[in-house]
Amino acid sequence: LFAEKETFAAKLLSTKAFVGIGLISYSAYLWHQPLFALTRRELGVQLPIQISFALVLTTISLAIFSLLGLPVLIELVVVVFILKFLKN
């Protein structure tokens, strides 16, 4: 899609809120497929509403963790590795 940067749509979609929603929704899209596919494989094609709701919450949690928690965890591991390397 092509849009000029000065248009209302471009300004609206480039706000932090829309960018954040876009990042979380893409991450959720990547997480939901294996979660739902593996659960359907184990429990059958028609999932109970409680299981589906739990999978949606798990998907959103993993999506947010992927964006916020995982980079922090990786940075922490890198810092610990560097400190350990400098100590030797």
Image (spheres, grey):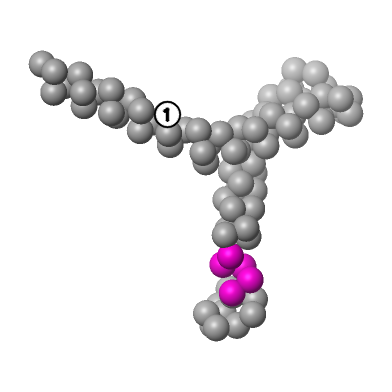
Q: Secondary structure at mark 1?
A: helix
Lateral position of residue 29 relative to residue 71, left or right: right
Residue 48 in sight in this render: yes
Q: Amino acid at mark 1?
A: Leu
Indicate the quadrant where residue 40 lies.
top right
Toward the left, the furthest residue is 88
- The structure residue drawn at horizontal position 52% and vertical position 41%, both measured from the top left corner, is 67
Instruction: Magenta stretch: give its range.
Output: 11-15
- The structure residue drawn at horizontal position 81% and vertical position 30%, both measured from the top left corner, is 52
Q: In the image, residue 25 lies at what x, y percent? A: 64, 48
Number of marks in picture: 1
Magenta portion: prevailing SS class: helix
Indicate the quadrant where residue 27 lies.
top right
Q: In the image, residue 29 lies at what x, y percent? A: 64, 44
Residue 36 in sight in this render: no
Which of the two residues, 17 or 7, is positioned nearer the viewer here?
A: 17
Lateral position of residue 71 relative to residue 30, left or right: left
Pointer 1 residue: 73
Indicate the quadrant where residue 80 lies.
top left
